[in-house]
Structures are given as C-alpha cells and as structure tokens.
Image: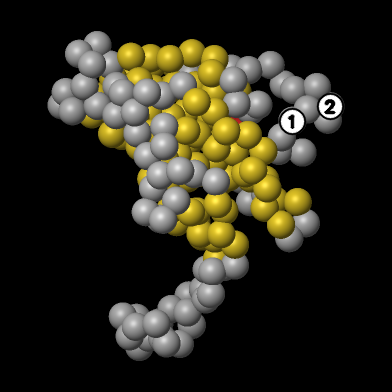
Amino acid sequence: TVAAGTVMNELLLWEASICDDTTAGHGAAAEGERPVEHRLVGHEGGVFASSWSTDGTAIVSSSDDRTVRFWKRTGSAWELQWTSWGHTARVWKVTLIEERGIIVSCGEDAAARVWDMEGKCMTSVQNSNGRNLWALAVDPANTMCATGGNDCSVKLWELPTVPPPTAGVNPLE
C-alpha cells in the first residue's frame, strides 16, 4: 500500500502496482493505474508526511494544521486513533519508530518532538537559532536522529526509549 498526502487535507491510500515503461506517463487511463482505496480525512491543512508501521496496519501523518495524527486499520477500515498538538507551526516530517515505541516529528517551529504511541509529547528538541526544521532522519539502529533546516546545519541527538506498553494498550496491537 502507498500513502500520499494532499493539499485537500487528505491522506490517500492505494495498492501499489508495478508499471512497465510502456504505460508510464500516459494519463489517467494508463494501464495498471490503481484507484484510491482509502481517504483518511481529519487534517485541517495539507498533509506533508506519513510513516507506516512495519506490518502496514498503522500510519502516522503530519500536516499544515500543526498536528501529528495516528491512524489504524481495523479489518478493511481505517480509523483515526489520536490527534496530537504540540508544534506551533507546520509539521513537515514524521517518522514512526516501533522498536522504540515512539514517533518523531519536526516542523517550521524549529522543534523536533518525540511522542509516545498514545500521542503524548515526551520531549522536544529546539533548534538553537529558532529557524525551521525541514528534514528528519533516523539511523538504522533507531538510536539517533538527525534534523536539518533553515540554519544550514545538521544536528544529531539520541532518541529516548519508551517502556513496552501493557497488554491491550499498544495501539499497534
């Protein structure tokens, strides 16, 4: 499944297909095109980023509306589980890090925020000069995060670990 945010405040989901070169770029009727299967509606601004759970049953999204949202698939339907506020401006990037039980976001407010899996902000790292953060990357071991932005620098910081949730509380279960 592929996800893409829109300026119409939606996160669109559809099944991916392999397209050979003979059908690429031939408009809406191109062979192999797949219809949108799900429209996740709830954001009040354009959706800039999303990140999947490894099993494809959950997705987080970030938006122009200054929120991070957590969506979960139950059967064939998708439901909004929670909406978290904390950023004071657009949220450009979001990453779901299941192994640590956290979600990381960064935005135009010069902050990178770490959320637990229930949507509570655990910590915030502020860019020292107050300029926008546009980029977010996590190392393969999921221990460090790099943020970059309008100050032309890359900052590395250690990610926290959240204790494992008790049975029935984990939103990924």
> Where in the figure is residue 88, as x and y percent of width and height?
37, 23
> Where in the figure is residue 106, as x and y percent of width and height?
37, 28
* In-front residue for pair 88/158: 88
Amino acid marked by disc 2: Ala
Question: For residue 167, which numbered disc appears in the image?
Answer: 2
Q: Is residue 22 left or right of residue 160?
A: left
Q: Is residue 143 left or right of residue 154?
A: right
Is residue 149 depicted above or below 57 in this figure?
above
Question: For residue 93, which numbered disc appears in the image?
Answer: none
- Residue at coordinates 41% horizontally, 32% vertically from top-left? 66
Q: Is residue 159 left or right of residue 73?
A: left
Tell me the distance, in whole angstroms, between the alpha carbons under discs 1 and 2: 7 Å
Q: Are marks 1 and 2 in contact (CB under 8 Å)?
A: yes
Label 1, secondary structure: give it: loop
Residue ranking furthest to the left: 152
Quarter location, residue 130: top left
> Taking the image as drawn, is residue 66 in sight?
yes
Q: Around disc 2, counting alpha carbons within 10 Å, would you say few (fewer than 14), some (14 to 19), or many (20 or more)?
A: few
Is residue 42 depicted above or below 127 in this figure?
below
- Residue at coordinates 67% horizontally, 52% vertically from top-left? 78
* In-front residue for pair 159/4: 4
Q: Is residue 3 left or right of residue 45?
A: right
* In-front residue for pair 158/47: 47
Amino acid marked by disc 1: Asn
- Residue at coordinates 54% horizontally, 28% vertically from top-left? 84
> Where in the figure is residue 149, as x and y percent of width and height?
23, 29
List the residue tagged with mark 1. Answer: 170
> Taking the image as drawn, is residue 53 in sight?
no
* In-front residue for pair 40/150: 40
